[in-house]
Image (spheres, grey):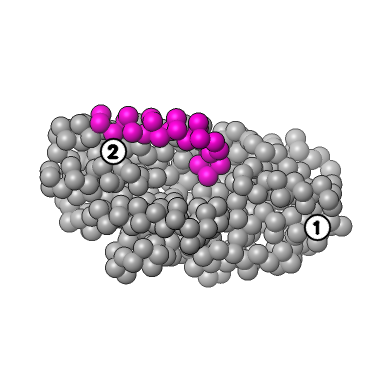
Amino acid sequence: MRILCWGTYDTSKPRARLLLKGLRLAGAEVAECHVELWHGVADKSQIRGARQWLGIAIRWLLSYPRLAWRLARTPKPDVVLVGFPGILDMIVAAPIARLRRVPLAWDMFMSIYDTVVEDRQLLPRRGLAAKLLHALERFALNRADLVFLDTQAHARRIETLFGLTTGSAETVWVGAETEHFHADSTLVNAVRSQVNSSDHPPLQVLFYGQFIPLHGIETIVRAARLTRSEPIEWQLIGKGQEADRIKTLLTEQPLPKVHWEPWVDYTQLRRRIASADVCLGIFGGSEKAASVIPNKVFQIVAMGKPLITRDSPAIREMLGDSPPCVSLVPACDAEALADAVCGLVRRDLPIGPCHAPLQDKLNAEAVGQQCMAMLKRHLRLGS
């Protein structure tokens, strides 16, 4: 299968890197026609100021003549694949792909409207900007021959949100870059011996990720407050939309056992996960939070670490109904999170890596095979 990955997709995110690598490992002939716009922009919702947005907009607009020319002139592929974010990419690519009679697939990954308006509430839902964003995203969706997201729950949500036919959106897991994130007992033992040599060390609980409503950072802080007398150390790594509010909470009522770092390099996350006794997923109460499995959960599972995260239809797609080494708690429920963490203090932690049955389903090749099967099935493509 000849696949042309086209547009301004964000290669700083694991999603794009895993798809590209996975498709090649799965046997696809992958060509790239790409302009990088998002290098160094970890959280697009935190872009501030007209000058910064203007710079991105100019680079964006200047990239399209060259991209469009190459799309029109490149040897005809079996499918053109547009990656996240891709809204404007879809609008530019659609007429060219239609003229060339090439199927157009969009890895939507997540809706910008859903993220900015519904989940983070950065724009009022009834405002003109939100309505225009919804209309633009719906227009882009209707240009695609195939749209896919990260979970079935997310696909059904997008269908409902934008009035698509039920079952029309497909699913490809996010996966994990297992060259970085994999179970390694030698690393775990080495890191733990450096972190704490006590005979009875406190339980190490780790959260890392953007400080956004979906992640439910306030729920984590409240759980830490409920367990402040327990032998538990909480490590928070991240920054973002809710950072100021979390800083205020921790300033007004300090928690000495909560440690917060705004940033850890991606290559160092593996060591931080290895040093933790248990890792945290997400705890937000939005419909989007119920529909997604974030990168961190795949990475934690690939590392074989115990996991606590909110219960949701999405997470059960991956972990099933009674997952070992996992505590599923209600959304926004600090008491349930505190109880789950305290439960680990009072009983023995798992010996050896967790999540063994999932390990072969998380790597790039597995993601690529899943994507290839989806493309063949939905677009009726051969090998």
Looking at the image, can residue 21 be seen?
no
Mark 2, residue position: 6
Residue at horizontal 70 percent and vertical 56 percent from the top: 218
Q: Give the x, y percent position of residue 77.
A: 17, 40
Could you classify mark 2 by the number of other residues whose Cα lies within 10 Å: few (under 14), some (14-19), or many (20 or more)?
Answer: many
Amino acid marked by disc 2:
Trp
Q: Nearer the viewer, residue 71 or 46?
A: 46
| Residue drawn at the location 26% of the way across and 53% of the way down | 144
Q: Secondary structure at mark 1?
A: helix
User: The magenta stretch spans which residues?
Assistant: 42-66
The residue nearer to you, when weighing 99 against 135, is 135
Residue 130, position in %: x, y? 45, 55
Assess whether residue 43 is covered by the magenta stretch.
Answer: yes
Distance CA(mark 1)–CA(mark 2):
48 Å
Residue at position x 45%, y 52% from top? Answer: 129
The circle on residue 321 is: none
Decide if residue 378 is in sight here.
Answer: yes
Three-letter amino acid code at the position of disc 1:
Arg
Give the x, y percent position of residue 78.
17, 45
Quadrant location of the N terminus in the rendered image: top left
The answer to whether residue 21 is magenta is no
The x and y percentages for residue 45 are 53, 45
Side of 264 where 376 appears, left or right: left
Q: Nearer the viewer, residue 79 or 60?
A: 60
Whichever of labels 1 and 2 marks the residue nearer the N terminus, that label is 2
* 86 on left or right of 207: left
Residue to which mark 1 is pinned: 225
